[in-house]
Image: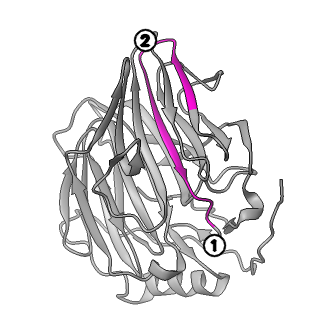
């Protein structure tokens, strides 16, 4: 999925100055963004005052939307660089095409992982014959300096490892949780897990105290470390935790996101992650005027034009807490 904001503003992210080095309970409210004609997303990252969680740099939650009589998700070809996209569904299907020639239909609790590296373009759409409901999350992972120009590639994993406890099933989307490791390729110490909780369940999830964490609520009502987290909101948890108490008031779906704090300061604008305003500006020009990002074949329609880039050079600014 793309950032379709036509008024996209560059932002400086990363750097340990933004990291809370102790356990906290910081509830983040979403910003609502229209994605195409029939899909509205709730944007949790980047958020005012909270730009990243480990290498996780972008989080959108959408649905459940009734698209029985709608086209559903329709995102034309658009570019990415310097990041990985993680497509995660609870309901519906998304057809992925990209400029490396990949074509895949992603279904609920299957991992669609696209590594843009130096440059890629892709489209996402609901198939013409699609399920009634669409519900999921789209997430980005920032690539570190040593790997941000790797060859672009796409991975689709239909079977992922799980960790279970009474009333809890945790599907490991990326990284490692409690000894279970996802087959998805990662470039920084990171974890992403889908947590399915049964009504009345109480569980203690093991964590790495060196990671910072957040929990996104997908559905239902759950308490995370005693804080009620409702669908479409996210609780930032800081660092220094070795375990996380969970309690479900109803059947609930959560996503655990975590990783070592991302030390590098990055510039994120539209669908690009770079290291300077000038790099972002060059990428925008190349998307509009060159073949750097390749061609998405088979999509019925034109590609997405880039919005105007504000002529403001960004300077890193940290915040110590």
In this view, 239 is above or below 297: above
Helix, strand or loop: magenta stretch: strand
Residue 168 falls in which quadrant of the image?
A: top left
Q: CA distance from mark 2 to mark 1?
A: 41 Å
Q: Is residue 88 left or right of residue 298?
A: right
Task: Say which residue label 2 marks.
Answer: 199
Viewer-side residue, 304 vs 243: 243
Residue 14 figure quarter: bottom right
Q: Earlier in the sequence, mark 2 or mark 1?
A: 2
Whether the magenta-drawn stretch holds residue 259 is answered as yes
Q: Which mark is residue 266?
A: 1
User: Which circle, 2 or 1, is nearer the viewer?
Assistant: 2
Residue at 53% x, 41% y is 207
- Mark yes or no: residue 54 visible: yes
Q: Looking at the image, is 230 positioned above or below residue 114?
A: above
Q: Position of residue 200 (x, y in %)?
A: 46, 9
Q: Position of residue 71 (x, y in %)?
A: 29, 42
Magenta segment boundaries in residue numbering: 244-262
The answer to whether one can see residue 38 in this image is no
Label 2's element? loop
- Quadrant assignment for the N terminus: bottom left
1 to the left or right of 123: right
């Amino acid at each position: 999925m793309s950032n379709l904001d036509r008024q996209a503003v560059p932002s400086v992210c990363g750097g340990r100055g933004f990291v809370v080095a102790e356990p906290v309970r910081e509830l983040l409210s979403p910003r609502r963004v229209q994605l195409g004609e029939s899909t509205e997303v709730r944007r949790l990252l980047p958020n005012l005052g909270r730009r990243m969680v480990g290498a996780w740099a972008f989080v959108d939650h959408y649905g459940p939307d009734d698209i029985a009589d709608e086209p559903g998700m329709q995102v034309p070809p658009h570019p990415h660089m310097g990041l990985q996209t993680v497509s995660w569904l609870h309901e519906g299907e998304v057809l992925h095409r990209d400029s490396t020639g990949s074509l895949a239909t992603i279904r609920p609790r299957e991992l669609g992982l696209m590594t843009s590296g130096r440059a890629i373009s892709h489209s996402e759409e609901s198939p013409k014959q699609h399920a009634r409901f669409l519900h999921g999350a789209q997430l980005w992972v920032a690539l570190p300096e040593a790997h941000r120009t790797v060859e672009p590639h796409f991975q689709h994993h239909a079977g992922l490892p799980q960790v279970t406890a009474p009333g809890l099933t945790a599907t490991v989307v990326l990284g490692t949780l409690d000894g279970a490791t996802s087959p998805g390729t990662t470039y920084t110490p990171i974890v992403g897990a889908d947590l399915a909780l049964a009504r009345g369940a109480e569980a203690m999830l093991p964590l790495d105290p060196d990671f910072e964490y957040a929990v996104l609520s997908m559905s239902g009502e759950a308490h995370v470390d005693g804080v009620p987290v409702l669908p479409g909101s996210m609780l930032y948890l800081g660092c220094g935790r070795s375990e996380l108490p969970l309690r479900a008031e109803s059947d609930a779906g959560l996503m655990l996101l975590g990783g070592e704090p991302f030390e590098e300061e990055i510039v994120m604008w539209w669908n690009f992650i770079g290291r300077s305003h000038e790099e972002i500006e060059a990428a925008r020009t190349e998307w509009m005027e060159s073949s750097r990002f390749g061609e998405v074949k088979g999509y019925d329609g034109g590609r997405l034009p880039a919005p105007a880039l504000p002529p403001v050079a960004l300077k890193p600014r940290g915040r110590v807490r």
